[in-house]
C-alpha cells in the first residue's frame, strides 16, 4: 500500500463549481498536512498547511483533515480557470530535524469557461 | 516576496558527466531540501540539510549524489556521473524551521536532461 494515495484525475469542472480534492494515507505518524498547487513545469506552491484534525479556511480554499480516517481534503469554492493546475497533497512527520515531505501523485484539475 | 531561486532552469548533459544544480534559499531559512520529479510522476524527497550536514536522505540519494552549502547563500546538489534515469525536474526547497509549525517553500526547479 502506498503511503499517500491521490486520484490523478484529470478532473474537469465548469467555472464557478465547488471542487473537492482528496488524499488518503496509511502512515498514522503523519502529523502535518499540506496542499500545494503546481502549474506545468513549475515548482510546487504552498496553498494550505494544517496540523490538526478539522477545517482550515483561507479565502476560497478550505482544507479538511480527518486523522481517524486518514483522509484529507481540499475544497475550492467558486472555481476559476486560473485554478487549473495540478494539486499535490503532502504530509510530514515531526522528527525534530528537517522533516521530509511525502507527496501524493497529484490531481490535475481543469476549470472550463 | 522572498523566494527560492534555482539555476540553471534547464541543463542538458551527456551520460557520465558531472552536474551541479544551484539553489539560493530564502535568506532567513535554516533547513534546505532537494526533491526531484520524474516526468509524469510524483515529487520525491532526496535529501534534507541543516547545520552544514545531511539530516536525512532517501534511498535515491546514493553515492553519486552530494550536497553542499559552499557559502552563506548557496545550496548545491552535485550528481557525479549522470545516468539517463537521472533526467527529471529537481526542486530545491527551504524552510525556516524543521517542519514544526513551518512550511517548505519550493524553487521553480531545474530540468535536467541526460542524453
Image: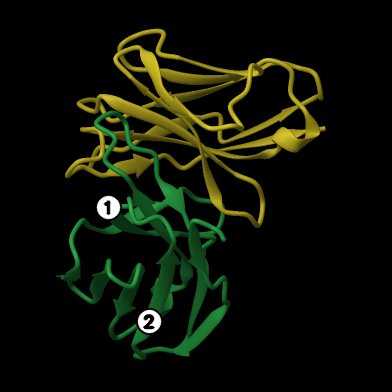
Chain colours: A green, B yellow
Q: Earlier in the sequence, mark 1 or mark 2?
A: 2
| Quadrant the C terminus of chain B occupies | top right
* Residue A113 visible (yes or no): no
Pointers 1 and 2 in contact (C-beta within 8 Å): no
Residue B69 percent location from the top left of the image? 40, 13
Please tell me the numbered disc located at residue A20: 2
Mark 1 to mark 2 CA distance (whole Å): 20 Å
Which one is nearer the viewer's eye here, A108 or B22? A108
Residue A78 occupies quadrant: bottom left
Chain containing the residue with disc 2: A
Question: Of residues A54 and B26, which is closer to you in this image?
Answer: A54
Residue A46 tag number: none
Up-down: is A83 above or below B89?
below
Q: Residues within 10 Å of mark 1 (few under 14, many from 20)?
A: many
Q: Residues within 10 Å of mark 2 (few under 14, many from 20)?
A: few
The circle on residue A32 is 1
Q: What SS does tag 1 mark?
A: strand
Left or right, A80 with respect to B76, comes to: left
Q: Whole-percent x and y of residue A45? A: 37, 53
Closest to the observer: A42 or A75?
Answer: A75
Amino acid at each position: 500500500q502506498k503511503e499517500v494515495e491521490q486520484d490523478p484525475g484529470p478532473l474537469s469542472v465548469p467555472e464557478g463549481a465547488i471542487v473537492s480534492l482528496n488524499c488518503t494515507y496509511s502512515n498514522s505518524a503523519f502529523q502535518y498536512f499540506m496542499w500545494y498547487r503546481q502549474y506545468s513545469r513549475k515548482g510546487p506552491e504552498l496553498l494550505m498547511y494544517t496540523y490538526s484534525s478539522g477545517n482550515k479556511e483561507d479565502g476560497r480554499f478550505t482544507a479538511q483533515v480527518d486523522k481517524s480516517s486518514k483522509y484529507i481534503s481540499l475544497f475550492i469554492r467558486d472555481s476559476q480557470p486560473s485554478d487549473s493546475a495540478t494539486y499535490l497533497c503532502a504530509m510530514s512527520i515531526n522528527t525534530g530535524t528537517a522533516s521530509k515531505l511525502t507527496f501524493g501523485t497529484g490531481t490535475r484539475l481543469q476549470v472550463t469557461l | 516576496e522572498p523566494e527560492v531561486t534555482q539555476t540553471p532552469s534547464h541543463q542538458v548533459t551527456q551520460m557520465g558527466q558531472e552536474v551541479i544544480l544551484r539553489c539560493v534559499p530564502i535568506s532567513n531559512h535554516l533547513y534546505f531540501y532537494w526533491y526531484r520529479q520524474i516526468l509524469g510522476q510524483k515529487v520525491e524527497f532526496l535529501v534534507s540539510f541543516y547545520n552544514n550536514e545531511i539530516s536525512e536522505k532517501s534511498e535515491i540519494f546514493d553515492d553519486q549524489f552530494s550536497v553542499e552549502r559552499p557559502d552563506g547563500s548557496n545550496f548545491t546538489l552535485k550528481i557525479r556521473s549522470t545516468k539517463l534515469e537521472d533526467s527529471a525536474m529537481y526542486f530545491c526547497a527551504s524552510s525556516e524551521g524543521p517542519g514544526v509549525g513551518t512550511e517548505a517553500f519550493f524553487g521553480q526547479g531545474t530540468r535536467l536532461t541526460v542524453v
